Image: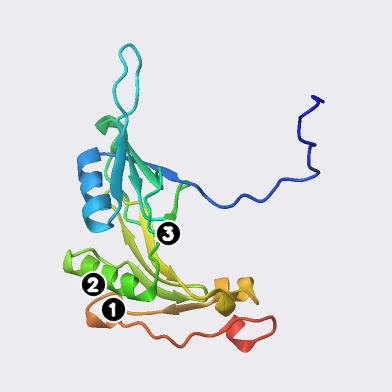
Amino acid sequence: MAKDAAPVPPQALPPRGINHMVLNVRDLEVSHRFWTEVIGFRCVAELKPIPGRQRPKMRFYSGLDAKGDVTHHDLALAEVAQSNGGAPEPWSLMPGRVGLNHVAIAWPDRESWLKQLAFLQSKGVPFLRRVNHGMTHSVYIADPDGHGIEVLYELPREVWEGDIDGAQNYAEMLPTEGAESLVDRTENPVFAAGHPAARA
């Protein structure tokens, strides 16, 4: 072992989280408009051509970090050749193929989330599912290529940290259309080991 090499740990170290994701899309311009104008990401970079080297047609997008600053990127879009695309499959939580099921995007608080839902509805974006989970309140939509998107705000940690399994298994299905789909209650079950709400 080199003198300054770190010792090999006995097991994998937990990561902080997922840094970014890359989606393959059929039409970069169509997807760019969706992810910026409908979802609200900001385009921060685009791959430039390099003579003699093949590079993907790709753009990079940022949300805001906890301090309200843009990141280097949270999302990237890479255009695939039309011949490889085919028609998008409708999104389903229980798909018949392997691959990405959905990506969850968080808004900073309940108020901004409710405003975003109203905005999505005003743009005619269908709500495919509207669910109060034990740790988030969520709406599921899809992008132009059928990638599932969970639009959410996270409930306070004290609501779900006592029984993460119970919070994950809790699902209150709500309306997906009209004004009823924009109603969000603030009374939430608290999940603790052995608490009845954990199995509701």
- Residue at figure coordinates x 49%, y 85% from the top left: 188
Q: Secondary structure at mark 2?
A: helix
Looking at the image, is 194 positioned above or below residue 25? below
**Nearest the camera: 161 or 181?**
161
Comparing labels 1 and 3, the label whose residue is closer to the camera: 3
Q: Say which residue label 1 marks.
A: 182
Q: Which mark is residue 104?
A: none
Q: Is residue 138 visible?
A: yes
Local crowd size for mark 3, using a 10 Å CA cut-off: few (<14), some (14–19), many (≥20): few
Q: Identity of the amino acid at label 2?
A: Ala
Q: Identity of the amino acid at label 3?
A: Lys
Comparing labels 2 and 3, the label whose residue is closer to the camera: 3
- Residue at figure coordinates x 63%, y 71% from the top left: 165
Q: Say which residue label 3 marks.
A: 67
Lower sequence index among marks 2 and 1:
2
Marks 2 and 1: CB-CB under 8 Å? yes
Q: Say which residue label 2 marks.
A: 118
Mark 2 → mark 3, Cα distance in angstroms: 25 Å
